[in-house]
Amino acid sequence: MKLRRKENKTDYLKRLHLLKGKSPRVVFRKTNKYIIAQYVRSREAQDSIEIEVNSKKLLTKGWPKEFAGSLKSIPASYLTGYFMGILIKKNKKENPIVDLGMMRVIHKTKIYAFLNGLKDSGLDIECDKEFFPEKEKINGKNMREDFSKHFQEIKKNLEK
């Protein structure tokens, strides 16, 4: 157990506070290739994943194949959060709290793009808008000119 703390994988005090709250959590994680989000409910310190979304799912929703390497970008984070929020609302789940784990929280990054997606889907997430990335970055205008036109199409496909 102490090994996970030394490896910066688990902050047990933070986890204890999250578990005492008895609210479901949305867990945000990023890997070298993807963004992963999970809707987790805990009972007696045992986590059960009720909904899981991976940014790889965006490929089936209209994400262009030539941008497959960018499934961990700011637009992918936003759309993954947006999709997670839609699934939470569709399944009539309780409004969650956000669990970022041991990740460094820096303003205007993928984490806040994900939170912006959750908020735009209709979930009640407390966060100042000044921390969110600019709309141009979220829409993918910094990636390539032709990506931003795909963005709205992907967003509509996620709502279906």
Image (cartoon, helix red, strand yellow):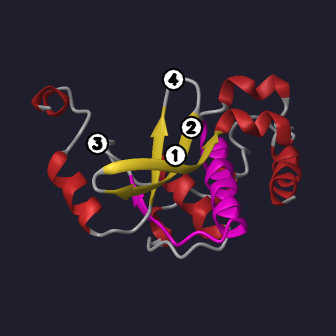
Residue 91: within the magenta? yes
Circle 3 is placed at which residue position?
102
Residue 62: within the magenta? no
Where's residue 127, x and y in %?
A: 44, 70
Residue at the extreme front? 44
**What secondary structure is marked by label 3?**
loop
Q: Earlier in the sequence, mark 2 or mark 3?
A: 2
Instruction: Provide the residue span drawn in magenta.
Output: 73-99
Residue drawn where x is 33% and y is 42% of the image: 103
Nearer to me, 146 or 151:
151
Q: Which of marks 2 and 1 is nearer the N terminus?
A: 2
Crowding near the residue tagged with mark 1, few <14, some 14–19, many ≥20 C-alpha atoms within 10 Å: many
Circle 1 is placed at which residue position?
110
Q: Do residues under tags 2 and 1 come within 8 Å of each other at their CB atoms?
A: yes
The answer to whether 142 appears left or right of 24 in the picture is right
Amino acid type at image mark 1: Lys
Residue drawn where x is 52% and y is 61% of the image: 132
Circle 2 is placed at which residue position?
35
Label 3 – label 1 distance at C-alpha? 15 Å
Is any part of residue 143 visible from this angle? yes
- Is residue 40 placed above or below 104 in the rendered structure? below
Amino acid type at image mark 3: Met
Is any part of residue 109 visible from this angle? no
Q: Which of marks 4 and 1 is nearer the N terminus?
A: 4
